[in-house]
Image: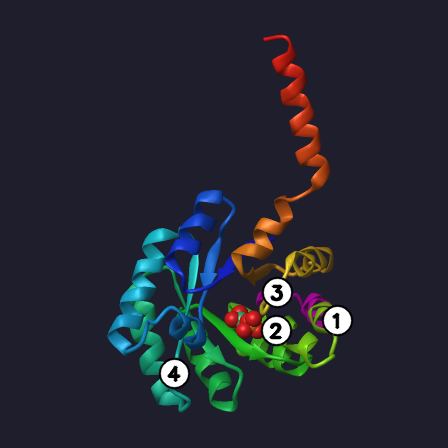
């Protein structure tokens, strides 16, 4: 299972990278704005800065919603760095752009996916990753995890290559549940990854081991 961090905050990206289990980064325009990164040139530079911190894939989102605009922007983004994956929204024109990118060797992440039908279309169009937003479904009292499970089932039926990137992960249990289902990737905040580390018995056990060791020294 790949671990991506879902942020545009360089300090958090560095921290996750240093933990040595990071496989990539996802961002979106809202996450960029949260870090005060605005304006096309600043945003493009920020993508390159992120690529220079991490070893893996970095999703960079197109803003255009027409096919030609998405293709132009996506090609510019892909040219920025070989770690860039072009993030394309699940809309009619997005499906067409996904197919173009797939036919032209540009890797993609189909974003804003909320149904199995959308995920099926993304796979048919050749998306590299599909991003079902589980947290936002949970927010509206719909089972986000069930969507991941249904997509897994359908993709396995047909051996689609598209990787399921569980997105809008909010906490540690989301990661564990996605791992049980077999999501290929998860993207979440640093806190959700760090939550995997924690167990009170580990802390108590270590404290005792160190105290006992020190008795003899
Ligand atoms: O990866 C998708 C993500 O950025 C959305 O997360 O927490 O805003 O629903 P959230």
Residue in the picture at 50% in, 59% down:
5
Label 2 Cα crowd, 10 Å radius (few <14 / some 14-19 / many 20+) = many
Q: Earlier in the sequence, mark 2 or mark 4?
A: 4
Give the numbered dot on residue 170: 3
For label 3, the SS is loop
Indicate left or right for 72 with 161 as reference: left
**In the image, farthest residue toward the top:** 216
- Image height check: is 203 above or below 113? above
Q: Which residues are magenta?
A: 150-165
Q: Earlier in the sequence, mark 1 or mark 4?
A: 4
Residue in the picture at 42% in, 55% down:
13
Label 3 – label 1 distance at C-alpha: 16 Å
> Along the line of sight, which residue is nearer the eye, 212 or 49?
212
Residue 199 location in percent, x, y? 69, 42
**Ligand 1 lies under 8 Å from the Cβ of mark 3:** yes
Disc 2 marks which residue?
132
Q: Earlier in the sequence, mark 2 or mark 1?
A: 2
Label 3 – label 2 distance at C-alpha: 13 Å
Q: Earlier in the sequence, mark 3 or mark 2?
A: 2
Label 3 Cα crowd, 10 Å radius (few <14 / some 14-19 / many 20+) = some
Residue 105 location in percent, x, y? 40, 69
For label 4, the SS is loop
Label 2 – label 1 distance at C-alpha: 11 Å
Disc 4 marks which residue?
63
Disc 1 marks which residue?
146
State the quadrant of the C terminus: top right
Label 1 – label 4 distance at C-alpha: 29 Å
Q: Quadrant of residue 123?
A: bottom right
């Amino acid at each position: 299972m790949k671990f991506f961090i879902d942020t545009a905050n360089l300090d958090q990206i560095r921290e996750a990278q240093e933990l040595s289990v990071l496989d990539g980064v996802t961002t979106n325009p809202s996450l960029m704005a949260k870090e005060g990164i605005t304006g096309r040139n600043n945003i493009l530079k920020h993508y390159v800065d992120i690529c220079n911190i991490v070893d893996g894939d970095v999703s960079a989102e197109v803003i255009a919603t027409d096919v030609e605009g998405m293709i132009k922007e996506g090609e510019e983004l892909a040219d920025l760095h070989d770690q860039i994956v072009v993030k394309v929204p699940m809309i009619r024109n997005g499906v067409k752009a996904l197919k173009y990118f797939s036919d032209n060797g540009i890797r993609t992440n189909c974003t804003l996916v909320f149904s199995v039908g959308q995920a099926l279309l993304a796979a048919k169009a050749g998306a590299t990753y599909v991003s079902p937003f589980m947290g936002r479904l949970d927010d509206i009292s719909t089972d986000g995890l069930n969507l991941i499970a249904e997509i897994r089932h359908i993709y396995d039926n047909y051996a689609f290559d598209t990787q399921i990137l569980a997105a809008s992960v909010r906490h540690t249990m989301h990661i564990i549940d996605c791992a049980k289902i077999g999501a290929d990737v998860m993207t979440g905040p640093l806190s959700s990854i760090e939550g995997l580390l924690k167990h009170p018995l580990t802390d108590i056990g270590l404290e005792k081991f160190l105290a006992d060791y020190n008795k003899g020294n």
